Image (cartoon, rainbow, N blue to C red):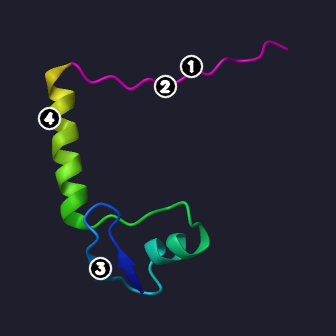
Amino acid sequence: MRVKCVLCDKIENIDDYSFQAKRLRNRPIHTYMCMSCEERITKRTNERKATGNFHLYRQRVQEEEW
């Protein structure tokens, strides 16, 4: 299966029967990112986390009291 990276527009081939290919076929919302872009984003995110100024703003789950 031919896929295109969403960040650098590099075209790569992945196995047609892999889990990632199945996910891309069945759920169009999922996008493909090449390994070099994924490593770069992971590295920079970890650097931002190390500074202490990185916050994830997740909504708190409120439990219903029944």
The residue labelled by disc 2 is 58
User: If the image is split into quadrants, where does the N terminus sit?
Assistant: bottom left
Residue 62 lies in what quarter of the image? Answer: top right
Indicate yes or no whether the magenta region holds residue 29.
Answer: no
Q: Amino acid at mark 2?
A: Arg
Q: Are marks 3 and 2 in contact (CB under 8 Å)?
A: no
Q: Are marks 1 and 4 in contact (CB under 8 Å)?
A: no
Which residues fall within the magenta stretch? 53-66
Q: Amino acid at mark 3?
A: Ile
The residue labelled by disc 1 is 60
Q: Residue shown at 35%/82% (left/top)?
A: 14
The residue labelled by disc 3 is 11
Spatial separation of the CA atoms under disc 1 and disc 4: 26 Å
Q: Amino acid at mark 1?
A: Arg
Circle on res. 39: none
Q: Residue shown at 44%/63% (left/top)?
A: 31
Residues packed near mark 3 inside 10 Å, few (<14), some (14 to 19) or many (20 plus): few
The residue labelled by disc 4 is 47
Q: Are marks 2 and 1 in contact (CB under 8 Å)?
A: yes
Give how far across and how far down residue 12 sits, in percent. 29, 81
- Mark earlier in primary sequence (4, 3): 3
Q: Nearer the viewer, mark 3 or mark 1?
A: 3
Q: Residue shown at 51%/71% (left/top)?
A: 24
- Mark earlier in primary sequence (3, 1): 3
